[in-house]
Image (spheres, rainbow, N blue to C red):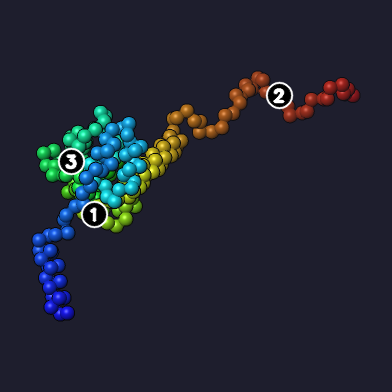
Amino acid sequence: MRSEFQALLFVFAAAGLSGCGLHDRTTIESPAAAQFPTDADSLDYWDTLELQPVTTNDDALHGLLLFVNTQPPATTWDERVAAAEALGWLEPGKNALEPLESAQMGLVAVCICHAIDVQGGLSMRIWGRVPRYCTRELVHMGLIPGITEHEALTGAEFIALLGAVEQRQFIDRAWAAHDSAAASADAPGDGQSTAPDQPASKSLDEAPASDETPADKGETTS
């Protein structure tokens, strides 16, 4: 029994030294983006992606480009990479992504931070929108749980994340509109008077001579 246990430890150690299982990515031969690559197929794409065990790089870029409604629509992997580079999501000439491999959370986080213009904290301002700090920022914003930039998302988790981002944008726009309206109301010179309107004062010549009450109509005086 002891020798079998030692042999098992040796297998795990060898696997760790070779990196087996640590950085390997799950692949899907026919992901949703490959089956339904156009805007017209978007409903089928979302329905299929929701059931996938992982979101591939192709799925992630396709879904994110649909989210921002990029024009013209990208319908192939190469077009999606080119569009992502043009938007600043990927660094041109340094793309090593495989379309059928599972997308890392860090890639998705970088794309989202660019898409909704997340400024982040000091680390992001110093190092830029890199996977680690973009992922941490989305965790801080409450959009994703506390996961690392190397982890993958299921199709349903990816869709839920985009839904949370869309809701966050809606709330941010509502608050911005509220703050703008409040600032306009507080600002002077916006056509709002500082005191309630008062009727024009009568001239002294038009003022009554005394405070006596006029006699009622038909009443005689003695």
> How far apart are the alpha carbons under marks 1 and 2?
88 Å
Q: How many marks?
A: 3
Specify few, some or many for label 3: CA neighbours under 10 Å numbering under 14, 14-19, or 20 or more.
some
In the picture, residue 179 is in which quadrant? top left
Residue 90, disc = 3
Measured as percent of width and height from the top left, residue 3 is found at 13, 78
Tag 2 residue:
208
Question: On the picture, is 146 further left or further right than 182?
Answer: left
Q: Mark 1 falls on what kind of element?
A: loop
In the picture, residue 176 is in which quadrant? top left
Pointer 2 or 3: first along the chain: 3
Tag 1 residue:
151
The N terminus appears in which quarter of the rendering?
bottom left
Q: Is residue 64 visible?
A: no
Out of 56 and 66, give the one closest to the viewer. Answer: 56
Name the residue at 29% across, 57% down. Answer: 146
Identify the amino acid type marked 3.
Leu
